[in-house]
Image: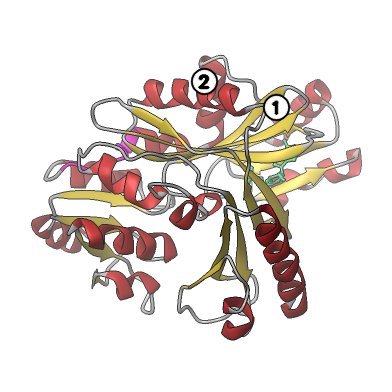
Amino acid sequence: MKIGVVGGGQLGRMIGMAGMPLGMRSVFLEPAPEACAAQAGHMIKADYTDHYAIRELVNQCDAVTFEFESIPPETVEFIAQFVPVYPVASSLKIARDRWLEKSLFQENQIPTAEVADISSEEDLEEAVSNIGLPAILKTRTLGYDGKGQKLLKRESDVTNAFKELGEVPMILEGFVDFDSEVSCIAVRGRDGSQAFYSLAENEHRNGILHKSIATEDHPLQSLAEEYVGRVLDALNYVGVITVEFFAKGEKLIANEIAPRVHNSGHWTIEGAETSQFENHLRAVTGLPLGSTRRIGHCAMYNLIGRLPPESKILEIPGVKFHNYVKKAKPGRKIGHVTVHSADQKTYDDACDRLDTLIQNIL
Ligand code: AMP
């Protein structure tokens, strides 16, 4: 079976790698000249809107998916005329737009921060007077890793904020004084079956995910599954989805959806009975979903900007190294390591050693 993947980054690379044992081969559509997914399949180097290239992709593939949400939904709609493509374009449209995303949560009785739709300076002033400060102004589309947003702490921050973010459609969100950030990765098959991974507790540095810990018996696990299950059914979703939440006391406050495999789920490669990548492929191709059961203690650290020496990583018991073979650049995700052990002490020691090793390359 051949799978088309729109996008050619590390997520595509890991989808391609997960397909190999299942006899699936991957074809990627990606304009970037040195895209790392090329190591895991055939690459069609072209823009995401290039209809000739898309025809070349669909002619080779039995099903198509995508590995990030900045691709135009029209591309997904075009592909759907020829082969099954999941997640469907309507899910992508919602996940790309923070206002539609928040509306989806609210329509399904899932708590969010206070939120207002902003399309002018006047809207912003009115929303600030209703929601109060601090608040966060975010562009409706194309924001990621903390980009396209501004924290408004005091009145003087409000003055030029609409201009600074480019006078595009935005939302204003009340600031949530959360205890922690968690993500729920789930998968829904073509037959509507659902499965959920252990909640990941996520730690960010400079707006980029630094570490994800797969939690054990998190007290909010079943609430998260209830909320994410509602989203999956509301979207008639197929594939892996990620919903990011703020956890505060006994509450979960939904922040955003990623309609794809997710960085906070990389621990599932070694740490779950079926990885998020394999389950995504199973869902997209109509195969039965695999068990999402976590095996032992698991965490994942991103390697950003620079890689520590390979031997220093590999000498740590319980640690696996994933090198995306990407050009190193400040702020760029170029690899990750997972920690996975049935033994608490091995796991704790590995995390301590990785904390030091990663601190040393910053
Ligand atoms: P986002 O692009 O929405 O994922 O936001 C990036 C990061 O900004 C989140 O991971 C949070 O740490 C922080 N953040 C976003 N929205 C809020 C909010 N309403 N209240 C507090 N922190 C937030």
Closest to the observer, 144 or 16:
16
Q: Position of residue 243 (x, y in %)?
A: 53, 36
Look at 74% across and 22% down and name the residue there: 250
Beta carbon at label 1 within 8 Å of ligand 1:
yes
> Callout 1: helix, strand or loop?
loop
CA distance for labels 1 and 2: 19 Å
Task: Please tell me whether residue 321 is drawn above or below residue 83 in the rendered image.
Answer: below
Mark 2 residue type: Glu
Q: Position of residue 53 (x, y in %)?
A: 19, 63
Look at 32% across and 25% down and name the residue there: 236
Q: Which residue is mark 2?
A: 226
Mark 1 residue type: Ala
The disc placed on residue 113 is 1
Report crowding for label 1: few under 14, some 14 to 19, many 20 or more residues within 10 A (C-alpha): some
> Callout 2: helix, strand or loop?
helix
Mark yes or no: residue 321 visible: yes
Please name the predominant secondary structure of the magenta segment in the image: loop
Task: Please tell me whether residue 140 is drawn above or below residue 268 in the rendered image.
Answer: above
Q: Quadrant of the N terminus?
A: bottom left
